[in-house]
Amino acid sequence: MTLSGEQVQRARAFARRGSGGPLWYFLRGFVKHPVMVGSIIPSSKVLIDKMLAPVDWANCKLFVEYGPGVGTFTQHILDRLAPDAILLTIDTNADFTQYLNGKFRDSRLRAVTGSAADVREIMGNFGFDHADYILSGLPFSTLPAGIGPKIAEETAAAIRPGGAFLVYQFSPKVREFIAPHFERIDKGFEWINIPPATLFWAWKD
Ligand SMILES: C[S@@+](CC[C@H](N)C(=O)[O-])C[C@H]1O[C@@H](n2cnc3c(N)ncnc32)[C@H](O)[C@@H]1O
């Protein structure tokens, strides 16, 4: 989403005033790193339910979430996750990691500051050599050069056969990054989100 100069000024003023709530953290993250955060509005509940619907939760021991931000998806993943499973969140923004660790008191959550491009190394630090599902709301098309392809390649190597890469994105261009690495890609669209988003479920057969 592109903001006008006036909108950026207003967002900055709001973020400076501060309240400590999730919207304030999200706005502050956006103002500090607009290219990395990508969107100024967290995902809608309708989008979250649709994105997570195909997950086989009974056979999910490790779920990885890239770019959790202030945890808009995180609680919904924890609500569905088995008691003995792990949710590993990876965000480049340390403010968001700190916020998640304060917000969620759930022993299944591992919130890490790092890049999705290092997913296998980060999973390895927690004793996992594969993930069942990986979710991404990363702004692929605005990430620094080379990062999108690296994340797509690393993600495909990290997911077990039968698992999937779940991607929601405002630009359908993300398909170009993931298509070389996945055998089957299902596509959806959700209007009830700001802005409306394209959804992909990329399966490892
Ligand atoms: C559009 S926000 C998504 C927020 C949230 N998941 C939602 O649905 O509302 C994108 C997030 O990706 C994070 N991010 C950007 N590049 C990243 C990378 N290479 N690895 C992990 N996180 C990254 C940003 O810090 C930001 O929190």
Image (spheres, rainbow, N blue to C red):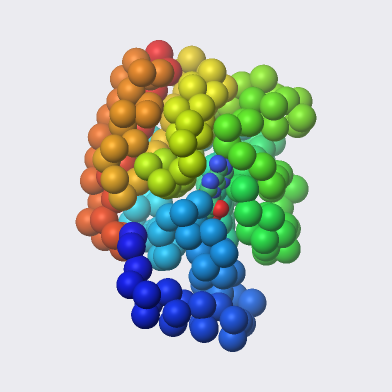
Q: Quadrant of the C terminus?
A: top left
Q: Residue 10, relative to residue 27: is it above or below? A: below
Q: Residue at x 77, y 30 (%)?
A: 125
The residue shown at (31%, 41%) is 199
Q: Position of residue 59 (x, y in %)?
A: 54, 27
Classify 192 as above or below 84.
below
Q: In this rendered view, identify the residue nearer to me: 10 or 112.
A: 10
Observer able to see residue 58: no
**Considering depth in this image, is 50 or 196 the residue closer to the camera?**
196
User: Residue 148 falls in which quadrant of the image?
Assistant: top left
Viewer-proximal residue among 14 and 4: 4
In this rendering, the answer to whether 148 lies above or below 185 is below
Closer to the camera, 174 or 9?
A: 9
Horizontal relation, residue 138 to residue 169: left or right: right
Image spot of residue 135 (x, y percent): 48, 39
Picture quadrant where residue 55 is located: top left
Residue at the location (69% across, 27% down)?
121
Residue at left offset 61%, top offset 21%: 130
**Would residue 171 be visible to someone looking at this image?**
yes
Name the image quarter holding the N terminus: bottom left
* Residue 164 % position (x, y): 44, 27
The answer to whether residue 150 is left or right of residue 49 is: right
Rendered location of residue 39, percent (x, y): 41, 59
